[in-house]
Image: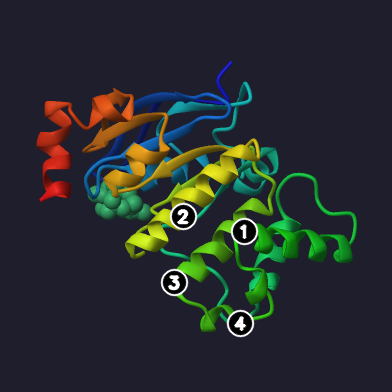
Amino acid sequence: MPLLKVEGLSKSFGGLQAVSGVSFQVAEGEILGLIGPNGSGKTTVLNLITGFLQPNAGAIWFCDENVVNLPRHQICRRGIARTFQLTKPFLNITALENVLVGRMYGRQPAPSRKAAEEESLALLERVGLGDKAHSLVKDLSLMQRKKVELARALAAKPKLLLLDEIMAGLNPAEVDDAMHLIREIRSWNITLIVVEHIVKAILGLCDRVVVLNMGEKIAEGAPQEIVHDPHVIEVYLGKVYA
Ligand SMILES: Nc1ncnc2c1ncn2[C@@H]1O[C@H](COP(=O)(O)OP(=O)(O)OP(=O)(O)O)[C@@H](O)[C@H]1O
Ligand SMILES: [Mg+2]
């Protein structure tokens, strides 16, 4: 049984078909890459899986339960967490307080405030931000803010974590750092869907890749196959390499 199974997912905004009959599966323990040109529907798919949007058609099976139309806190509680393409941490509170917010939702709420704080601090340490726990987020760098966002998502104790372009805007050394961290997160028994434009990261991280173009799935396979697929190169990778 796959951890996640998306079947015939469709979403339109007015006359625009943002996602059109998309189906794919994610096995437990996998890192699935979700790629495609700007506007191809990647973020919309993540919004549908996490209940931020409701589909016009299709099913989303998570642990054998159709989670379509569940409110998003219920989806979170079942074990799906995400980060946002535009990071949305609360800027005027500390990194630790941001993670605590995440700890209050999600699976297995902490037994006490003290336990929640200890766990949140441990998470910040695991993402390499222990020394910034008491810094205000507005004083942190982009990479550090992304780590806060990641720790906040991890605090919900997800089984499935969705990352929306977490590497965008990072320098090459930071990209390597982020790739290392994502592999580590997988080793904590967390399955991942990674939306990313950086080809090196897709090749270096993903077990499998799904390619969207204009809301439709146009290819699916091993990363090495995908980067040599003429159609994928034509609609997407040609532009990324250029
Ligand atoms: N809330 C919304 N209302 C109206 N149109 C939307 C909304 N969200 C997305 N769209 C449109 O749906 C299409 C798919 O957008 P989406 O954000 O899913 O693309 P994407 O693949 O994540 O792109 P990018 O790589 O630029 O992040 C785009 O044409 C976008 O303008
Ligand atoms: Mg997007």
Q: Residues within 10 Å of mark 2 (few under 14, many from 20)?
A: many
Q: Which mark is residue 178?
A: 2
Q: Which residue is mark 3?
A: 142
Label 3–label 1 contact, CB within 8 A: no
Q: Earlier in the sequence, mark 3 or mark 1?
A: 3
- The residue drawn where x is 30% and y is 45% is 200
Residue 201 left/right relative to 141: left
Above or below for 47 versus 90: above
Label 1–label 2 contact, CB within 8 A: no
Residue 136 left/right relative to 5: right
Front in this rendered view, residue 152 or 187: 187
User: Which numbered mark, 2 or 4, is in the foreground of this view?
Assistant: 2
The answer to whether residue 52 is seen in the rendering is no
Q: Which residue is mark 1?
A: 151
Q: Which residue is mark 4?
A: 136
Could you tell me how far apart the alpha carbons at marks 1 and 2 are, in whole angstroms? 13 Å
Residue type highlighted by circle 4: Leu
Quarter in which the N terminus is drawn: top right
Residue type highlighted by circle 3: Leu
Could you tell me how far apart the alpha carbons at marks 4 and 1 are, in whole angstroms? 15 Å
Could you tell me how far apart the alpha carbons at marks 3 and 2 are, in whole angstroms? 12 Å
User: Which numbered mark, 1 or 2, is in the foreground of this view?
Assistant: 2
Horizontal and vertical percent for residue 68?
54, 33
Residue type highlighted by circle 2: Ala
Q: Secondary structure at mark 1?
A: helix
Q: Earlier in the sequence, mark 2 or mark 4?
A: 4
Label 4–label 3 contact, CB within 8 A: no
Horizontal and vertical percent for residue 95?
63, 73
Q: Quadrant of residue 222?
A: top left
Front in this rendered view, residue 235 or 120: 120
Q: Residues within 10 Å of mark 3 (few under 14, many from 20)?
A: some
